[in-house]
Image (tube, rainbow, N blue to C red):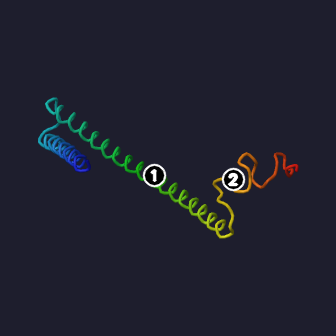
Amino acid sequence: MRTLIGLLLLSLLGIAWISVRSLLESYRENALGPSDTPAVVASIVSIGTVIGVLTGGILTGLAKLVQARGQSEADRVRAEADMVRAQAEMVRARAGLPPADGPPANDPPDSPPGGQAPGGHPPAE
């Protein structure tokens, strides 16, 4: 893909160079006249196209760079969060506590963690 874009850009630059050179030679020999209209139009169009392609390529490259930097930052934050979770699980495992993913083993599944009833009061016995 890059090769194709490079060849396209080189061909556009070549066309622009040839048309501008032709226009300047005609101007040097004699003043510009109606017969030089195709060379003037070709010069303007080819230079505008080259500028547009270069600008588009630069902006696309910058957009991909910004996107890649944002993605790498998001990946780094996600990895740090996973590391903190893993360290917390390691501390829980060393202390003999249950994993944080599910309810503690001694609590019924429908009760809140810590053995407290809704409202912050201990369960009635």
Residue located beneath label 1 in the image: 66
25 on left or right of 74: left
Of residues 44 and 36, the one nearer the viewer is 44
Q: Is residue 36 above or below residue 57?
A: above
Amino acid type, label 1:
Val
Quarter of the image where one finds residue 114: bottom right
Q: Residue furthest top?
A: 34
Q: Name which residue lies at 22% across and 39% down.
A: 43
Tell me what residue is drawn at x 65 percent, y 53 percent.
Answer: 102
Identified at 51% across, 57% down, the residue is 73
Q: Residues within 10 Å of mark 2 (few under 14, many from 20)?
A: some
Rendered position, 62 above or below 33? below
Q: Residues within 10 Å of mark 1 (few under 14, many from 20)?
A: few
* Name of the residue lying farthest toward the bottom: 94
Instruction: Give percent across and percent down for residue 119.
Output: 84, 46
Which disc, if any, is residue 91? none
So how many labels did they put on this image?
Answer: 2
Residue 11 x/y as whole percent: 19, 45
Residue 23 left/right relative to 45: left
Q: In this rendering, is residue 72 above or below 110?
A: below
Q: Dot 2 corresponds to which residue?
A: 103
Q: Position of residue 50 (x, y in %)?
A: 27, 43
Quadrant in the rendering for residue 38: top left
Identity, as a three-letter code, of the amino acid under mark 2: Pro
Callout 2: SS: loop
